Image (cartoon, rainbow, N blue to C red):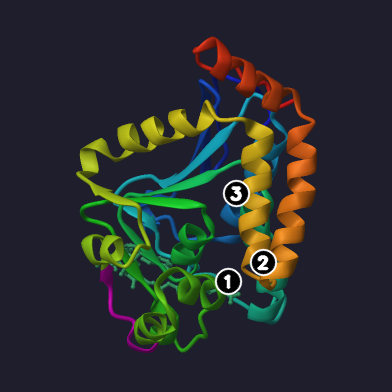
Amino acid sequence: MAGSGSGSQSTLSTIHYDVADTIAVITLARPDALNALDRTMKDELLATIRGAGRDRAVRVVILTGAGRAFSAGQDLRETFGGNEPTLAEELRARYNPLILAIRRLGKPVIAAVNGVAAGAGASLAFAADLRLASDGATFVLAFGRVGLVPDSGSTWFLPRLIGPARAAELMFTGDPLPADEAARLGLVSRVVPGESLMDEARALAGRLATSAPLAMAMTKRALARAQEVGLEDALAYEASLQGIAGRSADHREGVMAFMDKRAPRFTGE
Ligand code: T3D
């Protein structure tokens, strides 16, 4: 389970969790159903993300899927209403906390999108800080195809990531967005051959893992806040965070390392 420190692995029924060299890899693991999100997976994923947040041995999180898909979104075989939660209750109880957990995780999250990311599966990728895609990946805003409204934050994230007109087109049509077009729109940082996706994701995560953890966590908060406030508030928030960063041991270490012409050794203090 998450929280077990570096060099550890664990397997829940739908999630694999693997920590090595300060990088946690969370793998959605229902490959026969294209990693469709059932209630167990949503609960296990939330617990795992929160565990990675608490684990001081983890500096960067990679989220990916087992098999040929990232995630096909909500498991369409699950039932809603009656004795089960309604769709709205499911969003409030499971999906929304999941999206907020990714956004509030004080560590960078990289989505390594290894195949199709549909519906809420696409929303999970949008909630990550960075996205790398395999050349076979596609994003499908599949909600409308099954008579639903885009949810799990996709109406908030996608217009901000690629602009409102393209977001509306993808949501209205449900047309797949291939990886190369996603890269052109800035939705994914890079497209790489499928077989090298995880190596590339780990290499990127490794670079982020050498950065100052506290500064990175606060950078994530500042970027999120800047999406929601005007310039004056953003400037004020930057100043308050810089006050904290400026008092950190990592700032002192960064300046000393610069003077000594050596690589810094950040501790997150
Ligand atoms: O509370 C709430 O509001 C609920 C939240 C809802 C948010 C949502 O996510 S709504 C959108 C739900 N997702 C979809 O509508 C996508 C459905 N899947 C597809 O459109 C296609 O499967 C894909 C485009 C993702 C991939 O197509 P393809 O041709 O590569 O694969 P396939 O043959 O369709 O699927 C392979 C298997 O996965 C198949 O099972 P089988 O026949 O081999 O036993 C298929 O049924 C299964 N599968 C795919 N998607 C889902 C799924 N099983 C359950 N739920 C799925 N979403």
Residue 173 forms part of the magenta stretch: yes
Q: Which residue is mark 2?
A: 96
In the rendered image, the vertical position of residue 71 relative to residue 241, given as above or below: below
**Given the image, on which type of amino acid does mark 3 rest?**
Leu
**CB within 8 Å, label 2 to label 1:** yes
Of the two numbered discs 3 and 1 in the rendering, the one whose residue sits closer to the viewer: 1
Looking at mark 3, is its residue's CB closer than 8 Å to ligand 1?
Answer: no
Name the spot of residue 64 as percent of width and height, x first: 42, 46
In the rendered image, the vertical position of residue 251 relative to residue 86, given as above or below: above
Q: Residue furthest front?
A: 259
**Given the image, on which type of amino acid does mark 2 rest?**
Asn
Q: Residues within 10 Å of mark 1 (few under 14, many from 20)?
A: some
**Given the image, on which type of amino acid does mark 1 rest?**
Gly
Mark 3 or mark 2, which has the lower sequence index? 3
Q: Nearer the viewer, residue 104 or 232?
A: 232
Q: Which residue is mark 3?
A: 45
Q: Is residue 27 visible?
A: no
Mark 2 or mark 1, which has the lower sequence index? 2
Q: Residue at x 38, y 63 (%)?
A: 187
Q: Which residue is mark 1?
A: 153
Looking at mark 2, is its residue's CB closer than 8 Å to ligand 1?
Answer: no
Of the two numbered discs 3 and 2 in the rendering, the one whose residue sits closer to the viewer: 2
Number of callouts = 3
Cα distance between the residues tagged 2 and 1: 8 Å
5 horizontally vs 165: left or right? right
Which residues make up the magenta segment?
A: 172-177
Q: Residues within 10 Å of mark 2 (few under 14, many from 20)?
A: some
Of the two numbered discs 2 and 1 in the rendering, the one whose residue sits closer to the viewer: 1
